[in-house]
Amino acid sequence: MTDEVRGGMEWVPRFGMLEVPRQRAELIRGLFELAAWVADHPELPVPAVRAVVWPSSRNADFSAACSEVDQVGAALGVQPELRGGHYDVSTELGPVEITSFAISSETMAAHTAHMSYAENVQPEPIAAEATGGAR
């Protein structure tokens, strides 16, 4: 693998020159660098890889975010589902999961309320000998 860094549309392996925006070219390069890292380090476990396509309107209204999830689903050939205030679609490309989801404002509010208690729960510290000295 080369360490040479090039600009957006200048570097895309195997495909030659693709006319893609810089952000997409950087993602493609990062994916190829991850693949090279996995190939270069067979002594390490294979990482879990999950790609999340965030709706650009995720902070707007739920129906707009759901429409974007629908677009991702159509591109993947998978039908999104509404479950417990989450509208999501997910599939696997080999061992790589690709997903997109929208969360209703009611579900997000319930989660925020639930997490508001998080700082009130203080677990006992774990002794160093219990972890084998690991941090």
Image: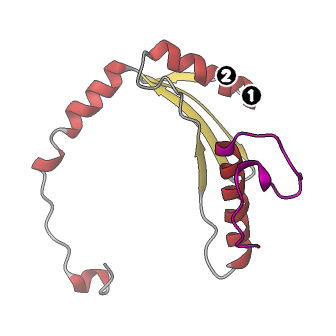
Q: Residue at x 64, y 68 (%)?
A: 46
Decide if residue 132 is on the left or right side of residue 102: left
In which quarter of the view is residue 59 placed? top left
The disc placed on residue 75 is 1
What span is colored magenta in the figure?
1-22
Q: Residue placed farthest to the top in the image?
A: 63
In magenta segment, residue 90: no
Colour pattern of the rendering: secondary structure
From the top left corner, tell me how far across and down residue 15 is, in percent.
89, 51
In which quarter of the view is residue 110 placed? top left
Q: Is residue 82 above or below residue 21?
A: above
Quadrant for the N terminus, please: bottom right
20, 129: nearer the viewer: 20
Q: Secondary structure at mark 1?
A: helix
| Residue annotated with mark 2 | 71
Decide if residue 99 is on the left or right side of residue 83: right
Q: Residue at x 70, y 54 (%)?
A: 7
